[in-house]
Image (cartoon, rainbow, N blue to C red):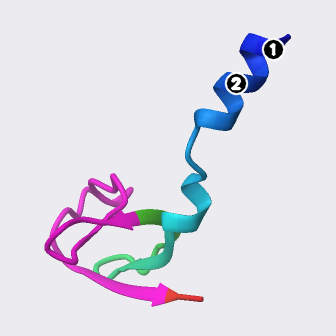
Amino acid sequence: MRAESSLSAQEPTPAAHRIKVVIRCRKCGETFILRGTRDSKGNIETGFKRCLCDNDKDFDIEVIG
């Protein structure tokens, strides 16, 4: 039991460093709400690769709350 509690105490709280973003495809209009983190250059990394319509370049990205 003590080993388990020490592991959970060492884990960082990822929610504190996460940013919620809305990604809208300009081609088909599909909307995705994802959480990401900022890298050292200030870019947001969500892991999003492409839309369902195979669009991988033309998006509106907005940071929310």
Residue at image point 75% right, 16% down: 4
Where's residue 45, x and y in %? 30, 62
Q: How many angstroms separate mark 2 from mark 1 (CA)?
A: 6 Å
Please name whichever residue, 40 or 47, is drawn nearer the observer in this view of the structure: 40
Residue 44 appears in which quarter of the rendering? bottom left
Span colored in magenta: 37-63
Q: Secondary structure at mark 2?
A: helix
Pick out the residue farthest to the right: 1
Can residue 34 be seen here? The reply is: no
Instruction: Say whether residue 55 is left or right of residue 47.
Output: left
Packing grade of label 1 (10 A; few <14, some 14-19, many >=20) is few
User: Is 13 a magenta residue?
Assistant: no
Quadrant where the N terminus sits is: top right
Instruction: Say whether residue 23 is left or right of residue 33.
Output: left
Where's residue 17, x and y in %? 49, 65
Packing grade of label 2 (10 A; few <14, some 14-19, many >=20) is few
Please name whichever residue, 3 or 21, is drawn nearer the observer in this view of the structure: 3
- The answer to whether the residue labelled 2 contacts the one labelled 1, judged by CB atoms less than 8 Å apart, is yes
Residue receiving disc 2: 6
Above or below: residue 46 compared with residue 3: below
Residue 52 appears in which quarter of the rendering? bottom left
Can residue 9 be seen here? The reply is: yes
**Dominant secondary structure, magenta:** loop
Residue at image point 47% right, 77% down: 21
Residue at image point 46% right, 73% down: 30
Please name whichever residue, 54 or 65, is drawn nearer the observer in this view of the structure: 65
Residue at image point 48% right, 79% down: 22
Residue type pointed to by label 2: Ser
Residue type pointed to by label 1: Arg
Residue receiving disc 1: 2
